[in-house]
Amino acid sequence: MNVPITPPRYEIRARQTATTVTVYQAYRPDIGLPAARDGRFPEVWKRDRMTWIKPSFLWMMYRCGWGTKEGQEVVLAVEIDRSGLEWALAHAELSHYVRDVHPDETSWKRSLRAAPARVQWDPERDLDLNPLPYRSLQLGLSGEAARRYADEWTVSVRDVTPLAREVHAAVRAGERERAAALLPVETPLDLAAPRPVRGASPASDT
C-alpha cells in the first residue's frame, strides 16, 4: 500500500530549471496581455508598488478564482532568473512577527520597513481550492526588488489563462485525473534558505 507523503509544512515548491523558476501572477488585460505578448511588463506596471509572486499554480488559482475575479482575468506564468529569487529571499523579512524568529517586535518592524521583499506562508490548495495542511510561499517585492523583478530577473512571460480554464473545466466535470495531469510540475527548490524563509507566519488570503 502506497501511503501519500505530505510535504514539509514550510517548503518552496515551483516549476523550475537549472537556471530559472516560474512564478504566477494575475492582472487585468491591459497589463497581462501586453506582458505576455512582449515578454516583459509594460510601462503601466507600477514599479514603485509592492507586487506578490506565487510559485504555486493552485494557490494562484485560489487567489484569482481561476482567472475569473475582476482585475485578475489574465493569469501569467513568469519565468525568472533563479539567482534573482535567491537575492529576494536573502533580502526578505517575514510579513508577520514570529517570536521564535525575531528578537522582539520592534526589531522585526524595523527590519520589515527596510526589507525590499516579504515572505508570507499561506495554506497550499488542492484541485477544489480547499486548504491543505502545508504551506505555500507568497513573496512580496517592493522597491529595488520589484524593479529588478520587472527589468532584470524576468526571462519570459506566458499567458496561462487557457490552462487555468482547462484545469477548472476538468475539475468541474469530475475529471480529476485529467485535471491533475494538466498541472505544472512543481518540485522543492534547492535553495540556501535564509532566516525569513524558515520562519512561520499566520495564514492570510491577501
Image: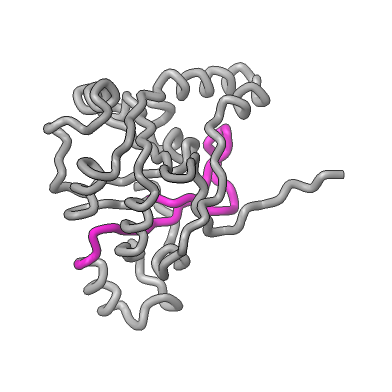
Q: Is residue 7 left or right of residue 69?
A: right
At horizontal 46% and vertical 24% (from top left) the residue drawn is 164
Q: As displayed, is residue 189 above or below residue 22?
A: below
Q: As displayed, is residue 85 above or below residue 38?
A: below
Is-magenta flag for residue 3?
no
Q: Position of residue 192 (x, y in %)?
A: 46, 63
Colour scheme in use: one colour
Q: Quadrant of residue 120?
A: bottom left
Is-magenta flag for residue 123?
yes
Evaluate whether residue 45 shows in this view.
Answer: yes
Magenta-colored segment: predominant secondary structure? strand
Q: As displayed, is residue 165 above or below residue 8?
A: above
User: Please, which residue is most extreme toward the right here?
Assistant: 1
At horizontal 58% and vertical 19% (from top left) the residue drawn is 170
Q: Position of residue 198 (x, y in %)?
A: 47, 66
Q: Observer-nearest residue: 142 or 63?
A: 142
Q: Which residues are magenta?
A: 114-138
Evaluate whether residue 71 shows in this view.
Answer: no
At horizontal 57% and vertical 20% (from top left) the residue drawn is 172
User: Please, which residue is most extreme toward the front here?
Assistant: 18
Q: Position of residue 186 (x, y in %)?
A: 54, 41
User: Please, which residue is most extreme toward the bottom here?
Assistant: 103
